[in-house]
Image (cartoon, rainbow, N blue to C red):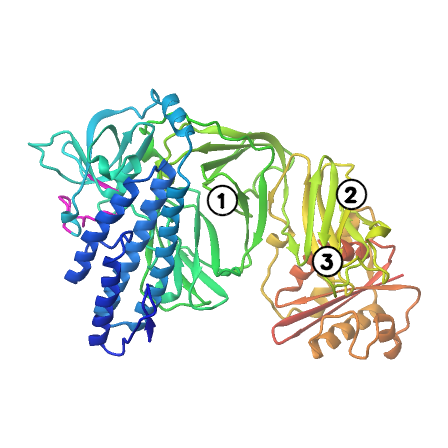
């Protein structure tokens, strides 16, 4: 059974006949609603009738309110999204696919409400009087080019062939022009804004020799549809393939795979631009999978866990010019023949584009927000986040090399992208900002403005592991730690701080923050301020009572850019049943390297400690337990006594585990302040234990004097 969209009537779709009845009832309800934008070409006459009525209604409704440029673009995008959903319903009826109809109706209901709420909000909160002031200030700043009259297609042409053999759609960014070769890109400008379209058709050239006839989507970017005709300009740009289509991705494309795409995602990018894709998961699965195949045939598969509101996000830098193939699905596998094409165009196609100065000066950045993300395919990336919706270009250069990456709110860079840069030479880091009339980067129409420019030092970056409400920042040369711990949690009264030189210092909280049991107070905000003496990258760690991290993350003090590969990126990560002697030899070398950096003497392998570490690793594997307490309830000293292993002096222990190679565990221990401090103690000997059970690695280091 399926609930109607706008009431509580229930329609049966147990047969195709009933499905058609349901469809009539569904669209009859749409006719009664004045603000729905339906698809413009359907197989059934009822749908076409709906289109004609609601298209007129939504135009009349938006003409009654004041829209700024951004609002006009957003409404156009929301219309396109609703179009895609209705087309999907039409296709599902043809295929008698009840499941898809149910999903699409649910999706349409949600997106329809979003659209109506958005339009009503604009009507209730129109732009302020500043608009007049801005219009006066920019009256003489216009996109230059050849004068032209700008019109738009009638809906009658929807679905018909254009003069070059393409199919016309109001959702595409296309144009008809008399004197321009087919498949040429045009910049069509009006005032301070412009739009890039592809010429694929001809108007009546004897009657309208200087008309540039646009699709409604393109026209709506530079003016109101109610204007009918505009006086503007055009500039001839580069040539693309006949098959190229510029459009935003239909939100319902992967609905049968449990995915609703956000409405503003473009299908065209520039080289090294970030493919930033968002949406909602519809089937109740926790994970989403993204598959990309590059023009050269390289395949990339990424997984992501959805947020609490069912949304998800993927970011990937598109490094090749040409056409990518893309699929996104709910779950961690998919079976489909539906692929979307993503096009990456060369910058030179747009070299003749006219630009204007921005009407508002963009805000300068004092620092860059960089986040390290470790991906399910065991690679990693760095994400630059920007609060402004403008298009950003990041340029990093030294005397020998320059790299350029781009994106709107997010720029993604693979962790190994700058591995060839000379660490002994500082780099110039510059970020520019440009305004775009659409979500497409090639629709930027303002001159780039530098919003960040510094000489910086490159350094490896580290991800933040945050299991509690703890925040760590650098403020005026001081490390500020504050947070709120819930009842029942036991977090140690210690801060392990790994310094830029690799040494570890331990700090404690003030007594006012300590509970009677010696742990941090619960349900009360705590704070600790630590002066930082030297610039560089610090690692901050707070631990639970059992030694696992409640918080572990990086803090930068000074002009450092943390985007180089770290030790995690440079090691083999797949699990293999390595020989214990290999594990011991590599572990000894790794630990001694850590000690050497901090000026500590080298350790030697000890047979007694090795036997003890092996017993510890095997005990954890047998009982599937990663703990400093063994299956008998004893600590490492008790384990030694019970197994008649003679120990002289004090001993210490580090343990780690996971479904990953032991080398990754070594890196994790070194990046943990508490475990690194244990490696740097005044030990003289070490033993290594290693076990694998059911694809899980159990690893132990035992230190002795």
Q: CA distance from mark 3 to mark 1?
A: 31 Å
Q: In this rendering, would 373 be left or right of 227?
A: right
- Above-or-below relation of 636 to 133: below
Q: Nearer the viewer, residue 35 or 230?
A: 35
- Viewport quadrant of the C terminus: bottom right
Magenta-drawn stretch contains 134? no
Residue carrying label 2: 529
Q: Are marks 1 and 2 in contact (CB under 8 Å)?
A: no
Q: In this rendering, would 40 be left or right of 73?
A: left
Residue carrying label 1: 410
Closer to viewer: mark 1 or mark 2: 2
The percent coordinates of residue 411 (x first, y second) are 49, 43
Q: CA distance from mark 1 to mark 2?
A: 31 Å
The percent coordinates of residue 10 (x first, y second) are 31, 73
**What is the total number of numbered labels drawn onto the structure image?**
3
Q: Secondary structure at mark 3?
A: loop
The percent coordinates of residue 181 (x first, y second) are 17, 35
Name, please, the residue furthest toward the right.
649
Q: Which residues are magenta?
A: 160-175
Disc 3 residue crowd, few under 14, some 14–19, many 20+, Cα 10 Å: many
The percent coordinates of residue 134 (x first, y second) are 40, 26
Residue carrying label 3: 485
């Amino acid at each position: 059974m399926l609930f109607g969209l706008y009431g509580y009537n229930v329609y049966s779709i147990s047969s195709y006949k009933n499905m058609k009845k349901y469809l009539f009832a569904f669209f009859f309800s749409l006719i009664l609603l004045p603000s729905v934008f339906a698809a413009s070409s359907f197989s059934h006459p009822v749908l076409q009738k709906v289109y004609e009525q609601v298209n007129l209604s939504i135009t009349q409704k938006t003409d009654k309110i004041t829209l700024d440029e951004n609002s006009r673009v957003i409404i156009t995008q929301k219309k396109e999204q609703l179009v895609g959903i209705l087309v999907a319903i039409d296709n599902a009826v043809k295929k008698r696919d009840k499941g898809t109809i149910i999903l699409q109706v649910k999706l349409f209901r949600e997106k329809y409400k979003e659209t109506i709420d958005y339009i009503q909000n604009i009507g209730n909160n129109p732009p302020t009087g500043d608009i007049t002031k801005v219009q006066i200030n920019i009256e003489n700043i216009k996109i230059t080019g050849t004068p032209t009259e700008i019109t738009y297609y009638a809906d009658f042409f929807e679905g018909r062939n254009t003069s070059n053999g393409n199919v016309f759609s109001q959702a595409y960014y296309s144009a008809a022009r008399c004197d321009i070769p087919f498949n040429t890109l045009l910049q069509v400008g009006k005032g301070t804004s412009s739009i890039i379209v592809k010429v694929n058709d001809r108007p009546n050239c004897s009657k309208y020799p200087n008309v540039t006839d646009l699709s409604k989507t393109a026209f709506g970017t530079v003016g109101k549809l109610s204007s009918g005709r505009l006086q503007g300009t055009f500039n001839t740009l580069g040539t693309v393939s006949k098959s190229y289509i510029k459009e935003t991705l239909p939100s319902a494309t992967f609905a049968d795979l449990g995915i609703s795409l956000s409405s503003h995602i473009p299908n065209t990018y520039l080289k090294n631009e970030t493919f930033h894709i968002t949406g909602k998961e519809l089937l109740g699965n926790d994970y989403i999978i993204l598959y990309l195949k590059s023009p050269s045939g390289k395949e990339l598969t990424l997984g992501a866990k959805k947020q609490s509101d069912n949304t998800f996000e993927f970011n990937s830098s598109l490094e090749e010019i040409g056409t990518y193939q893309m699929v996104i699905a709910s779950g961690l596998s998919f079976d489909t023949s539906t692929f979307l094409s993503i096009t990456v165009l060369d910058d030179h196609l747009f070299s003749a584009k006219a630009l204007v100065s921005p009407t508002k000066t963009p805000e300068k950045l004092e620092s860059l927000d960089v986040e390290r993300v470790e991906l399910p395919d065991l690679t990693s990336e760095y994400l630059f986040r920007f609060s402004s919706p403008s298009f950003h270009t990041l340029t990093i250069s030294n005397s020998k090399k320059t790299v350029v990456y781009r994106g709107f709110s997010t720029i993604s860079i693979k962790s190994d992208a700058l591995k060839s840069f000379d660490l002994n030479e500082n780099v110039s880091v510059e970020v520019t900002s440009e305004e775009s009339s659409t979500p497409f980067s090639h629709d930027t129409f303002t001159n780039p403005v530098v919003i960040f420019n510094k000489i910086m030092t490159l350094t490896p970056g580290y991800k933040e592991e945050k299991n509690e409400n703890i925040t760590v920042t650098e403020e005026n040369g001081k490390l500020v730690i504050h947070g709120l711990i819930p009842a029942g949690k036991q977090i140690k009264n210690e801060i392990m701080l790994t310094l830029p030189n690799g040494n570890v210092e331990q700090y404690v909280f003030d007594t006012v923050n300590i509970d009677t049991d010696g742990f941090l107070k619960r349900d009360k905000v705590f704070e600790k301020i630590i002066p930082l003496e030297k610039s560089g990258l610090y690692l901050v760690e707070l631990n639970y009572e059992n030694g696992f991290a409640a918080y572990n993350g990086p803090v930068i003090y000074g002009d450092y850019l943390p985007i180089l590969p770290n030790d995690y990126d440079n090691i083999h990560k797949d699990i293999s049943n390595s020989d214990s002697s290999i594990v011991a030899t590599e572990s000894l070398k790794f630990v001694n390297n850590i000690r050497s950096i901090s000026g500590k003497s080298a350790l030697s392998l000890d047979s007694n400690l090795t036997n003890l570490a092996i017993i510890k690793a095997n005990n954890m594997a047998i009982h599937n337990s990663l703990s400093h307490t063994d299956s008998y309830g004893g600590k490492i000293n008790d384990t030694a006594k019970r197994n008649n292993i003679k120990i002289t002096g004090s001993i210490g222990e580090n343990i780690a585990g996971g479904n990953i190679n032991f080398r990754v565990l070594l890196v994790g221990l070194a990046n943990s302040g508490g475990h690194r401090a244990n490696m740097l103690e005044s030990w003289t000997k070490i033993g290594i234990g290693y076990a694998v059970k059911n694809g899980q690695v159990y690893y132990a280091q035992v230190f002795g004097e």
